[in-house]
Image (cartoon, rainbow, N blue to C red):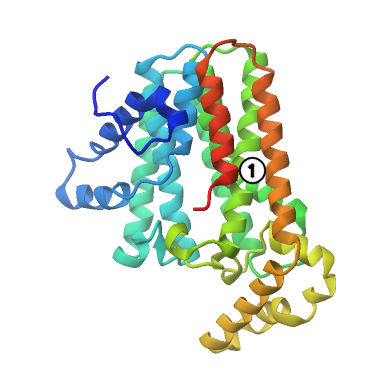
């Protein structure tokens, strides 16, 4: 395996250290044969790596069964490219100024560039998936792309329409976040020759893991450190999105759907001066933080984490260190602060 080991990887991912280094090396080659400005754009978007949790899951589920460099490395790259492409498009739709502490593509280069660069990344990820030559995995990838778009459209439709409840929230999370974690894990298992029972367990693991990941994201958007999170706190509420902590709070205080800061943000935002709008957002955030909604959201995330652990316990691969690594990812997801 080429590529230097990555010293930034946490201990529980040392099993795939050289594999992740190869993924990083190949990510740096995406678009290098195309024209220089495209290469500049790709270097910009790929030079500030996120957690790489999704490709790590692909590699680890491959090692859990039967790892094959020729298919698992391209699949891990495809998963990361798909994730990055979805972020480029989402940031443009959401008008987000920052991602991982850096100016987003749309805010730096404009919406047209963001749209086309996202398309380029989607196409590049599809090419990588096709390199696996596995029809089941290709079909899974296509379905995930559809679900990602479905989830974003749901979010657009329900922005500032706060009549919906937790059912719509969970449907959106399943599509926008959990679906990609599921593709990452299940593709690794399929390519590794897992049995159908094992694939079912991996599906349950990754769905629970991805959903917990989003719940923690929602909490961090309310009370995280903006410098660590890499974007302004309260971005979801600012964009008209009620996440789990807000929904749990409003379940306790349903009257605030009709009055108070939540109702004002929904009904008067267009006429509000920016300073007044920010004050209203901060008031709503403070109400949620001062309630038990955040603690309840952490409890939900921990319940989902335990479901993921139970799914792993059902896979009988004694002595396989990938199981411990996959468990480590669960702990990392629910304990992270950025």
Q: Which residue is mark 1?
A: 211
Where in the figure is residue 196, as x and y percent of width and height?
64, 14
Instruction: Locate residue 318: give its quadrant.
Output: top right
Q: Is residue 72 left or right of residue 31?
A: right
Where in the figure is residue 322, as x and y percent of width and height?
51, 20
Give the class, few, some or many, for how many residues have Cα within 10 Å of label 1's Cα (few <14, many ≥20).
many
Instruction: Locate residue 59: give its quadrant.
Output: top left
Q: Tell me the element at label 1.
A: helix
Q: Residue at image x 42%, y 63%?
A: 227
Q: Residue at image x 35%, y 39%?
A: 8
Q: Is residue 23 left or right of residue 195?
A: left
Q: Is residue 160 left or right of residue 47?
A: right
Q: Is residue 260 above or below residue 184?
A: below
- Residue 78 in view: yes
Q: 83 or 33: nearer the eye?
A: 83
Q: 251 or 291: nearer the eye?
A: 291
Where in the figure is residue 333, as x and y percent of width and height?
56, 42
Q: Is residue 6 above or below residue 202?
A: below
């Amino acid at each position: 395996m080429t590529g230097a080991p990555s010293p930034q990887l946490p201990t529980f991912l040392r099993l795939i250290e050289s594999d992740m280094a190869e993924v990083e090396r190949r990510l740096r080659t995406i678009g290098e044969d195309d024209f220089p400005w495209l290469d500049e754009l790709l270097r910009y978007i790929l030079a500030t790596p996120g957690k790489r949790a999704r490709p790590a899951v692909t590699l680890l589920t491959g090692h859990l069964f039967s790892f094959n460099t020729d298919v698992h490395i391209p699949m891990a790259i495809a998963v990361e490219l798909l994730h990055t492409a979805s972020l480029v498009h989402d940031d443009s739709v959401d008008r987000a100024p920052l991602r991982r502490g850096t100016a987003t593509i749309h805010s730096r280069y404009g919406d047209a560039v963001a749209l086309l660069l996202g398309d380029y990344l989607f196409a590049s990820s599809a090419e990588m998936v096709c390199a696996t030559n596995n029809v089941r995995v290709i079909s899974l990838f296509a379905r995930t792309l559809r679900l990602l778009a479905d989830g974003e459209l749901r979010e657009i439709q329900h922005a500032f329409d706060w009549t919906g409840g937790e059912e719509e929230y969970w449907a959106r999370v399943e599509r926008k976040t959990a679906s990609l974690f599921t593709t990452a894990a299940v593709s690794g298992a399929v390519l590794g020759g897992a049995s159908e029972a094992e694939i079912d367990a991996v599906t349950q693991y990754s769905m629970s893991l991805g959903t917990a990941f989003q719940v923690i994201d929602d909490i961090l958007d309310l009370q995280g450190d903006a410098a660590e999170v890499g974007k302004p706190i309260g971005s979801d509420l600012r964009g008209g999105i009620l996440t789990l902590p807000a929904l749990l709070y409003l379940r306790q205080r349903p009257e605030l759907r009709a009055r108070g800061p939540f109702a004002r943000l929904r009904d008067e935002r267009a006429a509000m001066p920016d300073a007044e709008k920010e004050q209203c957002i901060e008031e709503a955030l403070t109400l949620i933080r001062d309630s038990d909604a955040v603690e309840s959201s952490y409890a939900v995330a921990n319940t989902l984490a335990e479901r993921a652990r139970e799914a792993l316990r059902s896979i009988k691969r004694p002595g396989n260190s990938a199981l411990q690594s996959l468990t480590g990812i669960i702990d990392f997801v629910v304990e992270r602060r950025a």
